[in-house]
Image (cartoon, helix red, strand yellow):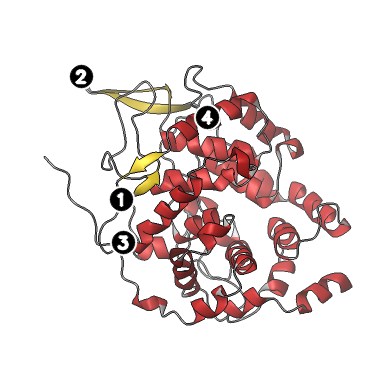
Amino acid sequence: MVSPELKTKIEEEQEWIRLLPNDPRRFLIESSESFTRYKTLVDLFEFPLNHPEVLIAHDAILQDKLVNNLLNQLSDWEKDIVTGHDKPEYLLNQLWLLLDWGIKPEDDQRMKSAIETILNHQDDETGQFLAYSITYNKETKEKYPMWTSALCDHNLIVSVLLLAGLKEDKRVKKGLMRLNELLTETTQGMGWKCVPWLYQKRRGPGRVNDVCPMIVVDALRGYYILPLKDRPKKLIDAGKTLLNCWINRTKEKPYMFGHGKHFRQPRAPFFWYNIGTVLDACRHYPELVRTQAFQELIAVSLLEFPSSDGFIPKTIYRYFNQYSFGQKKMPSPWLTLFLSRIYKDAVKVEHSIVNYVKNIDARQFKGSKGGEKHKK
């Protein structure tokens, strides 16, 4: 049931809704998904966290069967081997999703314990956080697990810890120093490269001097929590490098990070390089929202928005087949809210986005051409 206060909110004209074929707000607030309702109140309607309706909605999240299913399935950071940074079973992805739903470590002991375990594994010298991962000995051709990490582990860990409210923790501060010192010039501009894993010579398959777009995304996800004075001076430059991967896509692409069909179809939850991931990471930074690339990506994302109330997923993680964003038949409230939140925040920064985007024929944008081949 919609309260009189909510009814008034829904009837308020909002500039960002002009981007969409239909106003999704009633569809979202009437959703049976507890986390969608909660974040609609907080992120779309901007109700304060101590508002009675918000408190009731938050309590409903903690009682939600689907939320508790995910909390019960949290990976064991001490024992479960990391097999891929895009996997739903990857603990950092699970925690990021729970945090995005509005659940905090103090709300649930399972989440709090998982985060504390992550904090307990950090390289003393560099401050880089560690993950129990499969590594490879080229000489013996033996594969074995060990505590090491790629930079994409570390950056996502730091962002998750910031989102969890731990910016004052000395371990997180040390991790931030590591992240900041590795921000450097790449072939595409300021950003983070795929450097060798800690204690290893192993590194990712991309070109040595290319930017890794996903590492930039992971940093942007959490850094907005920090005051401006505590962010790297070149953070916005790194964000522009990320967006320029889209602008320059017909000339080159960082290895493995293209901009074709799979990039353009929003795939929730947004664990890996995808139009939704990039837009969500950049929406917190006005300098990035005002770029041509960001606004073109808004236009591309709207191509997938149907004429109905909500967004019907076209690509999914089967791991989440019990959730609205894990099926392809009906509109997903969470996916609709996720995209609506991006549009709302973007238009709040720059009202002219609406007219600019509505005048773009996003179907004209070509995919990635690809970059130079590795030299033998």
Mark 3 sits on what residue?
249
In percent of the image, x 68 and y 30: which residue is there?
Answer: 168
| Distance from the alpha carbon under mark 4 to that under mark 1 | 26 Å
Give the residue type at disc 1.
Answer: Pro
Label located before the other in sequence (4 or 3): 4
In percent of the image, x 34 and y 64: which residue is there?
Answer: 260
| Distance from the alpha carbon under mark 3 to that under mark 2 | 38 Å
Numbered badge on residue 254: 1
Q: Residues within 10 Å of mark 4 (few under 14, many from 20)?
A: some
Mark 2 sits on what residue?
139
Nearer the observer: mark 4 or 1; the answer is 4
Q: Quadrant of residue 181?
A: top left
Nearer the observer: mark 1 or 2; the answer is 1
Mark 4 sits on what residue?
177
In percent of the image, x 45 and y 30: which residue is there?
Answer: 81
Give the residue type at disc 4.
Answer: Met
Counting from the top left corner in percent of width and height, residue 317 is at: 48, 54
Label located before the other in sequence (2 or 4): 2
Counting from the top left corner in percent of width and height, residue 85 is at: 44, 41
Nearer the observer: mark 3 or 2; the answer is 3
Mark 4: which secondary structure?
Answer: helix
